[in-house]
Amino acid sequence: MERLKRKRWLESMVSCRRDIHAHPEPGWMEYRTATLVASRLSALGYTVTTGKRACMPEARMGVPDAETIRTHEERALKDGVDPIWLEQMKGGYTAVVGVLGGAKPGPVIALRFDMDCVEVGESDAADHLPRQLRFASERPGLMHACGHDGHTAIGLGAAELIAERAGELAGEVRLLFQPAEEGCRGAKSMVEAGWLDGVNYLLCGHIGVKSSTLGEIVASVEGFLSTTKIDAVFRGKAAHAGESPHLGSNALLAACAAALHLHGIGRHGDGATRVNVGMLEGGSGRNVVPAEARMKLELRGETEALCEYMVRETGRILEAAAALYGVSCQWETVGSGMGGEGDRSLIPLIEAECSRMEAVGSFVASMPIGASEDATWMLRRVQEQGGRGVYMLFGSPLAAGHHQTSFDFDERVLGTAAELLVRLVFACPGWPEESDTGPAGGKE
Amino acid sequence: MERLKRKRWLESMVSCRRDIHAHPEPGWMEYRTATLVASRLSALGYTVTTGKRACMPEARMGVPDAETIRTHEERALKDGVDPIWLEQMKGGYTAVVGVLGGAKPGPVIALRFDMDCVEVGESDAADHLPRQLRFASERPGLMHACGHDGHTAIGLGAAELIAERAGELAGEVRLLFQPAEEGCRGAKSMVEAGWLDGVNYLLCGHIGVKSSTLGEIVASVEGFLSTTKIDAVFRGKAAHAGESPHLGSNALLAACAAALHLHGIGRHGDGATRVNVGMLEGGSGRNVVPAEARMKLELRGETEALCEYMVRETGRILEAAAALYGVSCQWETVGSGMGGEGDRSLIPLIEAECSRMEAVGSFVASMPIGASEDATWMLRRVQEQGGRGVYMLFGSPLAAGHHQTSFDFDERVLGTAAELLVRLVFACPGWPEESDTGPAGGKE
Amino acid sequence: MERLKRKRWLESMVSCRRDIHAHPEPGWMEYRTATLVASRLSALGYTVTTGKRACMPEARMGVPDAETIRTHEERALKDGVDPIWLEQMKGGYTAVVGVLGGAKPGPVIALRFDMDCVEVGESDAADHLPRQLRFASERPGLMHACGHDGHTAIGLGAAELIAERAGELAGEVRLLFQPAEEGCRGAKSMVEAGWLDGVNYLLCGHIGVKSSTLGEIVASVEGFLSTTKIDAVFRGKAAHAGESPHLGSNALLAACAAALHLHGIGRHGDGATRVNVGMLEGGSGRNVVPAEARMKLELRGETEALCEYMVRETGRILEAAAALYGVSCQWETVGSGMGGEGDRSLIPLIEAECSRMEAVGSFVASMPIGASEDATWMLRRVQEQGGRGVYMLFGSPLAAGHHQTSFDFDERVLGTAAELLVRLVFACPGWPEESDTGPAGGKE
Amino acid sequence: MERLKRKRWLESMVSCRRDIHAHPEPGWMEYRTATLVASRLSALGYTVTTGKRACMPEARMGVPDAETIRTHEERALKDGVDPIWLEQMKGGYTAVVGVLGGAKPGPVIALRFDMDCVEVGESDAADHLPRQLRFASERPGLMHACGHDGHTAIGLGAAELIAERAGELAGEVRLLFQPAEEGCRGAKSMVEAGWLDGVNYLLCGHIGVKSSTLGEIVASVEGFLSTTKIDAVFRGKAAHAGESPHLGSNALLAACAAALHLHGIGRHGDGATRVNVGMLEGGSGRNVVPAEARMKLELRGETEALCEYMVRETGRILEAAAALYGVSCQWETVGSGMGGEGDRSLIPLIEAECSRMEAVGSFVASMPIGASEDATWMLRRVQEQGGRGVYMLFGSPLAAGHHQTSFDFDERVLGTAAELLVRLVFACPGWPEESDTGPAGGKE
């Protein structure tokens, strides 16, 4: 790529990222972002699918209530979003898939990018770069504090280069722009819609996390914790706390008891588990027996079996805690991710490409992680069918940790990540010639 | 009563009390005491009923297990208890009723005395009087620390004087010697056996409690708390706490949670309630997930409705606490007493008799009490049928509070109490002449 | 009072009530209401005191933060409130006192009215009368759902009639318009400012509560529960709940433990107590160890000693619960009321006046109440100095219970209450002639 | 070894094991067992040390109270224990060390055996072999249910063979017979007394555990959990639960709260932890506010740092739980074991010897274990000084798991284990010739 063109390409990714950063959208309501992606991919020649065919309705998790969704749809229209795209995505179906078929047979390669923001208000500190450069979030309480604005920009940057080299392409490239990664809510719906079926190679990645040096690439993250996210609501009966406390049923105390007993779920002899009641609120007035309380919690396990153990214990405890106070409890799974590992057999391939890139200064084969990601749903489906995948880290210093109000990354990571992905697309060993263990549906 | 005879009578009560004190017997196993009572009453001319006809089997509460009962029966035989009486009482039917019919029609008057000891080891302090005078408990871990030895002696002393004046007697006198008052376990079984049916006057009483002056008589105690005593056992599954804690189900934690949540039962707007988990134990070894835990608790309420509220809450909490830890919980009511008040209309009668007694130095019409007693079952049955009753206090200084290892009373209270009861028996207004509101079955 | 004039007087109270109802103001920020009161009283000839001399700064409780107060001050200016009055009240000093001296010596009579609203949003149901008649709250989340709009209107209505009869007046009348009754926050500051010193008669009252019949007057409410309101905040340390939960200190679990253990404070043998953690919230994200939690709670006792027992237990439990999780806890008293009884010796006087009033259809001498009120601070001060007081109920049917979104009363109660108060002012036995046990400072 | 002699040797181990099995002794009170060991070692020519020089007094943990110790000393005298040995061991100093010096320089080799029983009553089931063969425990509530009777017999069997080959011996053999392994209480005191100083090779082992096949040898167990055992007592104030619950301070509820919150200690991101409140009891009577409660608990961690984290959390929670109820809590460490691994470099040596033994049918190089052992104190000391050690498993089928009432092993394991140990003593590479990394004090 000639220098000037590359400069323009890099600048376009930066400006794309800043545009998205200024207009953050929470999970399942990324109407503006998804429309941007869909129209850009279309223009580049990709066959674009969005709406219910991109993400299976029943497999979506943690979908906001209809009222909230409608509000965001109206907001999107005011933002000038093309009503034709919006119509397809309406109701919270904001996944976008762009497919580009190669000229000759070859492997199916999927790249995954997430698009949603975090519900955190952006810092207005004077030294916060997005503030200085005037691309800070224009929406109070919402912010791209995790880096998905960058991921989307990388995805579109890569899409452009791949499209340019369409003629060289063998097999098929699928660009998966996923909604609602926060809370592990969106990936499964794209898996269930079939987009990972037949995939030979899956490439995922994240800016930063445990890789804080610009120019560092971690080829494969290991040890994702299997996770389940649960929302629970306890409902009892209000009463005047002075005159007739016995007429009430205390939903708040039930929630408090649940929180304590959930954190007391016994250790498991087979490996690590986690529980966190991250948010709890209840009660309507100081002198009223609380009639309602809500909590958001998450469970994790080193393996899926361990996570399931935590979920089983949790179900029993939530019901029992409600029974302690004679109230009801309803809960639902609002997100989940699986455990899993990248395929180490892909590491040499990545290392080889990195070694050819000027921008990559340091290479790490693999790194353990104590967190969860719903890309694991995709990885699992690919691996079950005989394909392979990795979850990479794209190194960047961070102004503050992920999900914090002053989060920011070094935008130079965008070009590095996009370039690496494009290189890998064209470097993946051509199936079926070089492999005979690919997935059944992988051949065209 | 001539002086010498009275002296002998007083001495016989003292020696009877000391004999019983030295041989304390826990509830439902008062074989030696009950046999003593039964044979003495027989000798005095009373018609004696004991065994299952004296206390209805199904209405007994908190009966010890068969093994324990058998051990006490064997012990009683070794004590030299007459096997003929024992045969009748075997299996934990130690109530004794003595009936003496009058020469002419008149009211039915019942006197109630309790016989069981407390499971407390007696003090071996040098200044403990029963130790000094060599009548301290000969049975480790058992002691008459509540005064029921005195009550039984009073009952037999009164029986003697009443028998002497049998010719003057109108109506009928029923002497009810009740087992298992501790824990409120025995009275109901005598009620259900019918011994309170037709009773016009019920006289009950207790040495000491809130009356600590020798020579004081409290005519009527008010405000008994309704109470229910419950035993619960939690059963889970043991497991090695280091290798495989997840294979266990922790019964001890369930019991701990139950204890805390029971003490958190909400206040009731209608009046006072109480809860006390008095004893709890569980676990078999430091490194074993506890598979069993047991607790003894009691509930009280200013009214029966309030006590029932506590029982309802308790049942739900015990089950829910078990569910919290995936264990089972079984519980049973092992004792209960009702609320209630003595009949104030009897106070003048008692005051009049007291005023004629040299030994009575101070008279108190009524006194509130915050405790529970199962004599309330008897009082309730009598009142429901139109009869009247009181629960008196017989004043005595106490060496230490009830149920404490150094408990002792002033034996001079025995004569005072017995004399008052005899006087009342002969002073009770003769029904049916003076009343037309008596119970249906009260007439002979 | 001639008929037409009375009609106009009644209408002015109704319109005053509706005006206040449409413009509800929370405690310590009743700028518009207090200014209305102050200027009306001035116009009627009362000597008016407001600001810091009307309510002692340090004795105020539960004062909102400076930012909130400032916002309400700006809002009041926009409402057109006279800046001269506002300047006096600025910073949350919204008490207003109006004093009218009599022509001759006599008793000091204080009348107390409260002015603040509740933080409840008003119902927009079609059949909600204030909605139909277009005087519903114009401020979202704020509503006169307790009846203080009516109380203020009654106070101004009474002020007018008393002023008209100023010539007949002996002694002194003090009209106390109190801020921040909700949460028991305001009365003490007026007491500490001295306004109850020297008062011979204190007349307080409330629309509705336990008197739901129009035309009923309850002369004296008995058995206020002593109460203390507490706000607590727990502060710990956030951490990623998956990777490094051990780096966090869980403030939410500390709050939950505190809530449960507070509700487990043992019953007291001396009388009724209450505890209610009415609101609790904590945590910032599902996957973050919660670094902060807040709770609002209240304690009550049949007597002040019982309430103090609850406060002592609470302090210890809050600290211990924080220590359980290695977090800190800060708490403060944000409101309090005392126990207490009205003076029964005033009941005949009230009954006599009621019997002369056409509007009063039923008279109740006294009625028990299970609630708390900070008028008890005033009553206590008056009684300590030898004065007497009552807390009356002015009967009215209610559209919904107090503090509910559909609360409303029958406006005919305004005239009845105001007339009764005025009658009592002129009927109070003239001190010092008829009594020699009045308070030291009561004489002019 | 000729066949007949071997037969006699095997029989003597079996009869020794059965004798000890019939006379189980709990930790620090193994007077009969230790005397048996001491006199046998003496007779075989070992220099024997026992009493305070064998186990440092202050480093002993979980020592029973003086009264209990005295009772067992009297019992031992009645058993016919030689008073001269007893005199040395009196007060709970029952460690025994036998040292045999070689004819020439060489390594110091320590073998460790534990002697104490478990507080479990032995099964009286008809098919329980010790019952059938009449060597079941003669002491109610005490039983060798862990296999230490076998360990002691193995130690004495090995001692005999080593003594026979004393002439071949280079360096020094130290036989360490340790008291109080149960609860991890005894090993540290022998370490602190210096017996592991200068040791080049330490050989420990256990019958069964995770090796349940006769003839199997596991050369080295890995992954002991670091552990701390704690006893806690809560002391409050008793009160009548009906009349005056507020006068009490509830020690039982404090203990229950502690138990729940201890089990809620947060997971640690660095590795596995464990907590178990294995036993808890409290309260004196159903109607008495419990004034005392006791608990036995244990903590574990994959590393010592993790175990220390658990201990720190526990200390804070015990104090805070006491503070919740206004009671006191005292706790003490009554046992502890370290984490650690055997030296893998010794595995080939063990494998080589096993391959020469007819009785060894299967060899396992190493095996993970989720349990704790205080032999780790010894292993650690040896390793810190440059020595090496292993903890082996001697395979045997078990009639029931360790610590269960029907526990029993196949006595044929005794000969196999003893033979292997003797072989290893003579096979250990002769230091200093073959190694230059031995501990400073290891040379004679």
Image (spheres, coloured by chain):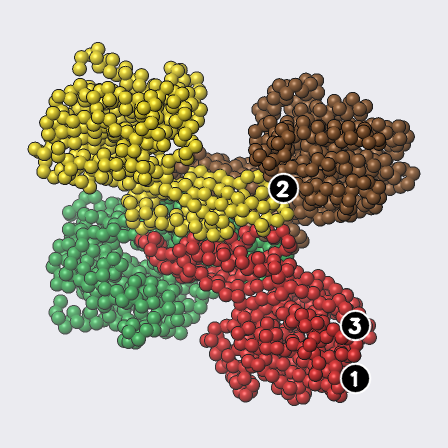
Chain colours: A yellow, B red, C brown, D green
Of all chains, the one bearing label 2 is C
Mark 2 Cα shell of 10 Å, populated few (<14), some (14-19), many (≥20): some
x, y percentage for residue C359?
78, 40
Q: Which image quadrant for residue B162?
A: bottom right
x, y percentage for residue B289?
38, 57
Q: Residue at x 20, y 48 (%)?
A: D344
Q: Is residue B121 visible?
A: no
Of all chains, the one bearing label 1 is B
Which of C155 and A214 lies nearest the eye of the viewer?
Answer: C155
Question: Could you tell me the amino acid type at mark 2?
Answer: Gly
Which numbered disc covers residue C401? 2
Instruction: Estimate the spatial distance between the alpha carbons at disc 1 and disc 3, rounded to whole Å.
Output: 22 Å
x, y percentage for residue C128?
61, 35
Question: Could you tell me the amino acid type at mark 1?
Answer: Met
Mark 1 Cα shell of 10 Å, populated few (<14), some (14-19), many (≥20): few
Which of B138 and B353 lies nearest the eye of the viewer?
Answer: B353
Which numbered disc covers residue B1? 1
Which residue is label 3 attached to?
B349
